Image (tube, coloured by chain):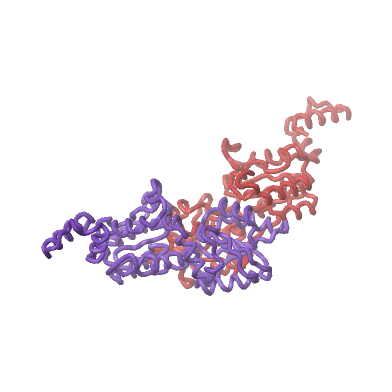
Chain colours: A red, B purple
Amino acid sequence: MPLHNRRTFINAALKAAGASALSLSAMQLTFAANHLKKTYTVDDVIQLILKEIPGAPFKQTVDTIKSGSGSQQVTGIVTTMFATVPVIKQAASLNANFIIAHEPTFYNHTDDTNWVQPNEVLQQKLALLKEHNMAVWRFHDYWHSHRPDGIFFGVIKQAGWEKYYKEGERMLKIPSVSLKEIITQLKQKLGISTLRFIGDINQSCENIGLMPGAAGGQAQVSFIEKYKPDVLIVGEVHEWETAEYVRDARAQGAKTALIVLGHSVSEEPGMEWLVEWLQPKLQGIKVTHIASGNPFTWM
Amino acid sequence: MPLHNRRTFINAALKAAGASALSLSAMQLTFAANHLKKTYTVDDVIQLILKEIPGAPFKQTVDTIKSGSGSQQVTGIVTTMFATVPVIKQAASLNANFIIAHEPTFYNHTDDTNWVQPNEVLQQKLALLKEHNMAVWRFHDYWHSHRPDGIFFGVIKQAGWEKYYKEGERMLKIPSVSLKEIITQLKQKLGISTLRFIGDINQSCENIGLMPGAAGGQAQVSFIEKYKPDVLIVGEVHEWETAEYVRDARAQGAKTALIVLGHSVSEEPGMEWLVEWLQPKLQGIKVTHIASGNPFTWM
């Protein structure tokens, strides 16, 4: 029910109860509206989120509805990195019909459904989404634009580095530990089985650069040039860009090491933190995090 | 010495020896030129290679000289995937002053030296190249355009799959083996310590798709859609593209597994095969392969 319809309904209800709607303040009305509210559409949830994002709505963004309708009534919300086939099925089993995913649903950044032909996998996925009447909204650009960056803050929290975080900064100064200790800690806290790194496991690290996800070589290399971290922690790299740059820098005597966590696991804590952030804003709707998890096995 | 100068020299030498240059056929002249030839410039070597590439020279290509001069006399040639700092130093120690590299030298596809600022690592690398008077030429687009694709054929050969190769095809039909056996064989033959995969290690594989390097998600996913291989073997992926597509496809019941070898190690055999291909075309110049190797450690 749109807001103006809900107000009309409340006014009518209050009138029927003998009260004068005109004597109620706007604050009281809002309180009454929230209190009575039991249902949200997908659009209601999105609008409620965007109110918290500086500069929203954006003219250009990949954060669009990928499946389902903005007008459908939400039965439950699942947050995740990727709305994979298993995540869709688990969401449905929880009676949720709205997935908020950080990354693409259709295997390319803009979720272009004509990206490849005939894309039978995509057709089957669309059918699965339809079968479960599942709405999917991408929450990427907006979540990164939240202050603090929702993904970054979730990762900091999960890694146990919240006390070293300075608002808006991607560099953290932590008590000096070895690269090996940082890797061990990140694997344990973020639930990572295996990761890749470039560096000396015995080197000391206290100036940590953190860029979860796949920011791209230009952003990652520019960051190293600017901040000269002891280690840069990222989700994913282009090997011919950041990895080769770090390899050369170290061969020249630079200290900067590189840890590549894996894309999905590197940002998942931000979608877990979203539950904590979003749940108090909604009444009667359960918000659940399902980790889409790392897709790889190592051998 | 440019070709016309060499011809003049040969003619003069033959005249001095009492022979009539005019009575010699073009074929005899070419033979005499090749026989007498002891020196090559970088441009000579490039031209000699391009004669073997269909459609060369290309109007648009990243295969340009990245360091040194086309007119410098070649003392020795090194082939590699990446002209890393250690590869440059090893080449110099072999008295080679010309590196033929498959991938970028300056950490981005077009080798734009202004890609990031101030790029101190790049400045130091340029100084090292200058110190050793080292020419670097990228041999990417042309080597892939050779028939057979030089990289692809080198990998096939190294993997022991030459007998299953059909000219121009990227699918191979091999006797059925488990995914585990393929991974074990590739690790051993290509000298890979650890790799990532998606799939069931016990599944049988006989239809193999092979795309060394980083062809990009659109090419990789289109390939799977078209050929439905039992396993696709690649060098590098965008995790949000090919990896997520394969994960969903498998969750839907498809068989296609994915092996991600690592970019550098996936194409290195093609730069090793280049030695075998190029050496017989040159007299008095040593061609050596130096593997730039995998940059990562796993933990």
Q: Residue at x 59, y 54 (%)?
A: B223
Q: Residue at x 52, y 52 (%)?
A: A215
Q: Is residue A172 visible?
A: no
Q: Residue A235: horizontal and vertical position, in percent?
A: 55, 58
Q: Residue B38: horizontal and vertical position, in percent?
A: 23, 66
Query: From this viewpoint, which residue is outermost toward the front?
Result: B23
Residue nearest the viewer, comparing A16 with B139: B139
Q: Residue B276: horizontal and vertical position, in percent?
A: 39, 68
Q: Residue B202: horizontal and vertical position, in percent?
A: 68, 71
Residue nearest the viewer, comparing B34 with A13: B34
Left or right: residue A234 compared with residue A278: left
Left or right: residue B115 compared with residue A269: left
Left or right: residue A75 compared with residue B205: right
* Badge count: 0
Residue nearest the viewer, comparing B48 with A109: B48
Say which quarter of the image contains residue B19. bottom left
- In this picture, is B273 found above or below A152? below
- In this picture, is B102 found above or below B194? above
Q: Is residue A17 visible?
A: yes
Quarter of the image with the C terminus of chain B is: bottom right
Residue nearest the viewer, comparing A9 with B293: B293
Quarter of the image with the N terminus of chain B is: bottom left
Say which quarter of the image contains residue B206. bottom right
